[in-house]
Image (cartoon, grey):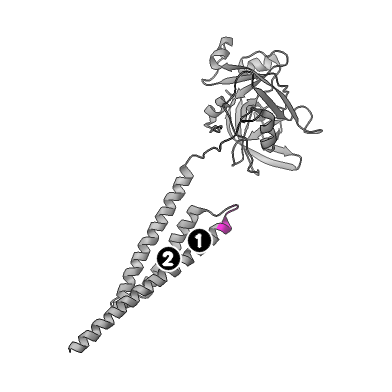
Amino acid sequence: MVEQKRKSRIKKIIAIVTAWITIVLLGCIMLWFTSLVSQSVTGALSDDQPNFAGSIILNGLIGILILVIILIADWRFRKKVYFFHLNIGLWIGVGLYALVLTSGIVTHYTEQNQPAESPLTSCTTAVDKYRQFGSAIVPIATDQGYGTGFIIDDKGTVLTANHVIQGSSEQYASYSSGRVNMTIIDQAPEYDLAILKLDRFDKEYFPLSNQYFVGDQVAVYGYPGNTFSAGAPSLSSGIVSRILTTADLRLNETTTPDGFELIQTDAPINPGNSGGPLIGSCGVIGVVLAISDSAELSQYVGAVSEQGIGYVVSINAAAQRFKLPLTPNN
């Protein structure tokens, strides 16, 4: 009798040890398998790089599913010592994969709701900034006319002047390589600004800088005149001649929104340059209005244009109206 009890105890210990060895081995295999599958799937579904949060979520889901299937399969043997301890280990595994799943969901939520950080940009010269980011300048055509815009983030968001697209039923980027459709996202007629979205775009975009002062060298790049049918777009340069705030503009008895700000420049700008970037040494500092006619300029912003003078809506005003992040400078 004593010998039987001793043998029974030994068998029980062996069953328990075997069960936990099985659990450890199964855990290692599961970890390798679920990680491999989740990374492969998310990598195949992603256009550029694997989705880290998605991989974690898929890892947790696959692990829970496999463990639940095993638990259902061996449930009828649950009273046997080996399967009793095996099931304990499996339930612990389900709990751990549930934590993995939860952490993936939290990571995904955090990534989606975290404001994008703007990269630092070095301040050099306006021409250098044009050479560095010029591919982000967009030739805009509509059924009403043409103008210019520029990409401001890696999602294909385009900032331009509102009068470029106002009243139009279709808008598209008229590249020399072909046409890319655009969608109007938001309009601010009181600022003469508009936000559009390109259907297809590169990752290049202009940094937005609030570093500008009277006397700074600036550059204007855009598509004036007949550049949509002949010739290349043009680059012109000048300086910041003065900066007009809301208070200055109200001297002309024109109602302007709080935070509205104009930059006056002597850089040559013409119709067609409208909506293009005024480029400073740290990035884009404004959106070109390109209205040299005194009557139209007064209608839009309450300012009178002198000969050889152009006006630009400052990037500070655009950032305030559309909640745009400004790029830190170093």
Task: Tell me which segment is drawn in magenta.
Answer: 43-48
Amino acid on which disc 1 is placed: Ser
In percent of the image, x 67 and y 28: which residue is there? 126
In percent of the image, x 36 and y 75: which residue is there? 74
In the displayed structure, does residue 45 sit left or right of residue 171? left
Q: Badge 1 is on which residue? A: 38
Tell me if residue 87 comes above or below residue 321 in the rendering: below
Amino acid on which disc 2 is placed: Leu
Q: CA distance from mark 1 to mark 2?
A: 13 Å
User: Depth check: 95 or 294 in front?
Assistant: 95
In the displayed structure, does residue 80 sit left or right of residue 153? left
Q: Quadrant of residue 21 in the image?
A: bottom left
Secondary structure under tag 1 reads: helix
Residue 309 x %, y %: 69, 16
User: Depth check: 45 or 117 in front?
Assistant: 117
Question: Would residue 320 be visible to someone looking at this image?
Answer: yes
Residue 32 x %, y %: 47, 66
Q: Badge 2 is on which residue? A: 65
Residue 6 x %, y %: 22, 85
The first of marks 1 and 2 along the sequence is: 1
User: Depth check: 144 or 228 in front?
Assistant: 228
The C terminus - image quarter: top right
Secondary structure under tag 2 reads: helix
Q: How many other residues sit within 10 Å of disc 1, few (<14), some (14-19) or many (≥20)?
A: many
Tell whether label 2 touches label 1 (CB within 8 Å). no
Tell me if residue 98 comes above or below residue 23 in the rendering: above
